[in-house]
Amino acid sequence: MWFLHSSLLWALPAALAPVLIHFISLRKARRVPFSDLRLLRAAYARSLPTSRLRRWLLLAARCAILAGLILAFARPVLRSDSSGVLAAAPGEESTRLVVLADVSYSMGYRPHGRTRLELAVGAAQKILRGLKPHDRVAALSFSDRIEKAGPAGRIEWSSDAAEAGAFLEELRPGFRTTDFIAALQPAYAFLRDSGPGRKAVLLLSDGAAHGWRREGAQEIRTAVSAYDPSVMLFGLRWDGPAGNAALTSAELLFGPSGAPGVSQDRPELQVRAWLAPGDGAGGLERELEVRLGEERVDLKRLRLTPGRETETAVRLSGERAWAWGLAGLQKDALAADDVFYYSFWLEPRPRILMVQGGPRSFETGRGGYFLKKLFADVRGGLLPYRAEMMDVVQARRARLSEYAAVVLFDFREFDREFVSSLDEYLRSGGGLWIIPGKTQDPSAWRGLDGTLPARVGMLDGVSSASGLRPERPLSESGSQRRLSWTELDLQNVSFRRRYVLDPHSDAQVWFRDGAGRPMLLQGRRGAGRVLLSAAALDLDWGNLALKPAFAPIADAALGYLTGFQARREPRMATLGAPLVRRWSEQEPLPASAVLRDPSGKRVPLQVMGRKVEYETDTPGIHRLELAGSAEPEFTAVNLDHSSRESDLRPTGRPPWNGLRVDASDEDFMRALYGRELRDPLLAGVLLLLALEVFLANASGALRRAGILGLCGFLWFCRPVEAQEGDKFVWSQLRYDGNWDPYPSAPAEILGYVSQVTSVLPSPQRRSLTLADPLLFSSPFLVMAGTQALDTLGDDELTRLRAYLTSGGFLWIEDVSGLKTGAFDRWVRRTLHLVFPDSDLRPLAAGHVVHKTFFLMRDLGGRVAVSKSLEGVDWGGRTVVLYSRNDVLGAWAKDALGKPLFDCVPGGEAQRADAKKLALNIVMYALTSNYKSDAVHQPFLLEKMRSGTAP
Amino acid sequence: MRYLDGLRLARLRGLRLDLRRYRAEGYLSGRHRSSQHGFSQEFSQHREYAPGDELRTLDWKVIARKDRFFVKQFQEDKSLATYFLLDASGSMGFRSGGRDSKWDYACSLAMGMAYLVLEQGDAAGLVAYSARPRDMLPPRRSLGHLERMDRLLGGTVPDGAADLDAVLRRVLGDIHRRSLIIVLSDLLGDPAVLLKSLRALRARRHELLVAQVLDPAERDLPYGGMLLFEGMEGPESLRCDVESLRRAYREEFDREQLWRESHFRKASIGHMTAYTDGAWNLSLARFLQIANG
């Protein structure tokens, strides 16, 4: 607590005066001879305890009244925070205020029409308007980093609060997350380096808990290195948020990891939605729309539970290299997080050439039949390969290099040419799987000798021991990596016939039968890979094709041969990190890249070091168009959900001083300068006075009247509210109808006023109705009109009269330009009602309004309807000034600054007079009859004589 | 006269103190019919002369007729001696608000009554007392006695403490005959002691009338602020804030007055309280009303 007039505190001992008076009066008691003291003494003895108590109470009350009065006039100010800052009176020290505006996407929360950012900026504007001229402001916006540092682009002090306000007005919520520390750190550092003074930081934020990094609100002391407890930190207090739903992730699933029936050409998109808990939010039901590309593929209702993630899967169809699109929830108060973009690159399925030996290979029970089943199932095929079936004749014409692997099965024989092309294919890195056929001619192997990893021996017709022993883990190749051989019924596999294989030294055995003889061999030929089966898949050779292990074995074999891993790459990025596309050494490097962002803007990117980088600030699908590639690459950019930005719940124990959004200036000023205790003190003094009267049994009417008078005096000692500091405010009367015919005129006039005179006008015009409580703190009121208005009610008339008779000034401007208009009649009628005792009469040429600033000889205006102003006098001054020449109209300008109307008939001279007259009227409202003082007469006479009156 | 001027005498016109209801016993003739025979005009009987009888009572006509000495006996009008006991203690000098002091008021009352008594031929005596009888005038029947009374009262200044008991003991020794005793006092002091002495007076078959003369200030305590009350009958004083104890004082005062009244009534002592702000003749009239029954 401190005192604005602390010197008055020296008078505090005077509060003990009643005690002194008491003792003096005790000593100087009036002597009264009395006949009999017996009764008196008895009464005295009886009333002694209460009378003594009452006496002391009375004394205490009187002392307290005096002390209260002295304290009240010393104007104590109480500051709520106990930061230990040396308190100073408001006028003594300037305030340095750093305004930090949060533009993270959670500030776009819009529960009732206006976003939180707009509300926060509105609250800040009120505070900025209340700053004193010597206060300094710096404004910056932040999200998880400093976004914009003030109007000048860097943090620096400005004495113009309006400039900072304009900067704040332009801010819009972005798409990044919040990090208070990132903003507070530079703000505190800046304040630390800015010299002494009262310092404050205003955090225009939703104050949500997600804005802290780890320890929550307490980390400000540790994480902000320049933290200074004497800097006052202000935040805003918000209503609790409603529950806010957000989509947080999307995952593309297919293959065995997905649900049954999900395959590469029919993948499943798994979308996660999250409902941030909020006030009164139970579960919610929201519509979820999923688009693949631009096309809607699903619309479903989603039941959301607060604080939980809800998963849902949407089946996408059609094979494509890129699966991209968006999932969107029905929009809620925070719309930014209701959309999630996804984009996945899918590894293209390899082509496999299946070469059958003869036309009967696909008959039921034959090996070809089962192989074909692997790829051509009604549900889309068990294995993710595009298989093409050909006979040898067709195969001879095929370009083997287009295929990732070749499977030879059920063949009878091969001509040399095919074998040599196969060998060439193998050497250049192809894959070959040779499955013997039923009608195999052992001589057919001969051509393949160099290719095979084993020497093929005799056909062994004796049924071998059942079971298949794997020698190579399943997980090394194939798309079904989650399986292991032990899960499959390999022990039930049996073969009735097989070739005896004699593996080469570099061959590797995959399977052996129960007797330990190799059944599947792996070998290499150049860069190529070769697999050799010992037995055909026909049912009369063995039962492998009927067993569940068949598909995994085939998958593993083809995976080994093709190197296909069914890769899918999510191409998704979060805002805040740059988009990066890297090319591996294998991939061809594009010559140029152009990025097209969601808004369609094209950004050419430079490929440097096998990568391109781009920092985006918009969520959505970004297309990377590469030179030499037909199809663009898609990258989905999403909001950062890692810090739970969608959770709008406020910080538990915020380290700032919470300001009410709708009364931010009041709270701010109170916290900064403290609360003045004069009124409560005076109220206390009044109470004590009442107690004193009660205790003292004062019965005299005089005394009562005196005390009442004192009460009244104390009440009027309350501070009078100044309207706008020392600024002149242009107030204009608002009513139903065309109350503002020239919206630009007041600003022009005020500009002229500040240019020509030393009057400080407030840039903001104030418009008010007669019922507005601000009316009585707006001593200058302008009313412009063209048509008749509604007749004023009794209370409005009373109010207007009270306003005018208690110091208000009303300038009525008839802008109709008519000699007898409806507005004119209305004005005369109304003024007669307001002032029945004082008429509206023309102002004499010598009226002081003609010389308050300029010496007017002619009246100006847009038109020349009347030769003189009219006015109503009250109490020696003109309280209503009525002009009919449309003075305001002469000021109206278009956007280019040209006058909107010609002044008739006087032209520009008349306009100049109108300008002078407007200024004179303003000055008359401000100075009243000052210029009629005799002291000005010599100057006026001199000017009039010389004829140089401006 | 100081206490009885023409104006006051005029005010007394029409007032009468009827003392016949008190059975008078005295050797002075007055308006009161005595049970004793005396020398008056109203013949009662004849009786044989005995030596010592006044010769002027011999009935010559009977002597002449019977040749024996007879004296005439008459119904004697006995005068009633009325004693005014005036309290001249210091407290009687109390006055407030420009009014007469209680002493002056009591004197006026006493003189008015004395006039009424003397005017009808009865004897009136006067005792002014404080702690002891200060001045005394024995009862006389002449109106001229009024002058003496007035002089005496005018020369007395109230002073000292009152002690009615002691005074009565002294005075009663001198009053042998049954008399009407009128006490004019403020009756301040221990009421129980006072009542005892008045009862003793009654017990000696004296008629007793008590006029209590008080100043309204003694009832209302119309002061404000811190005061130092100084006793008028002694050196004691009391410093107090009047306002705080006015209510209590008034209660005490009323309580004591009630007590006094009820006990006087029980002891059949005629009692009246007069305040000095009332007109003295009205108080006198009221007192006479009480005295006349």
Image (cartoon, coloured by chain):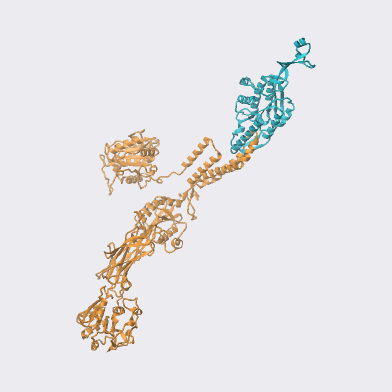
Drawing shade for chain B: cyan
Residue A731 sits in quarter? top left
Quarter of the figure that contains the N terminus of chain B: top right
Measured as percent of width and height from the top left, residue A290 is found at 29, 64
- Residue B252: percent from left, percent from top: 62, 36
Residue A546 place in picture, x, y as percent:
29, 80
Count of residue discs: 0
Q: Is residue A199 left or right of residue B19?
A: left
Q: Nearer the viewer, residue A388 or A9?
A: A388
Give above or below for A244 relative to A919: below
Q: Which quarter of the figure has residue B88?
A: top right
Q: Is residue A597 visible?
A: no
Q: Residue A724's spot in the image, x, y percent? A: 40, 46
The residue closer to the viewer here, A104 or A52, is A52
The foreground one among A619 and A922 is A619
A6 up-or-down from B125: above or below: below
Q: Quadrant of residue B139?
A: top right
Asked if A511 appears above or below A713 in the picture, the reply is: below
Instruction: In this rendered view, identify the residue nearer to me: A346 or A7.
Output: A346
Work out which residue is located at the far bottom of the displayed protein and give it. Answer: A458
Judge from the rendering whether residue B123 lies leftward or rightward of residue A851; answer left or right: right
Tell me the quarter of the image containing the C terminus of chain B.
top right
Q: Is residue A907 visible?
A: yes
Which residue, as the protein is rendered here, is positioned at the far front?
B66
In the rendered structure, the colour chosen for chain A is: orange
User: Which residue appears farthest toward the top when viewing the image?
Assistant: B64
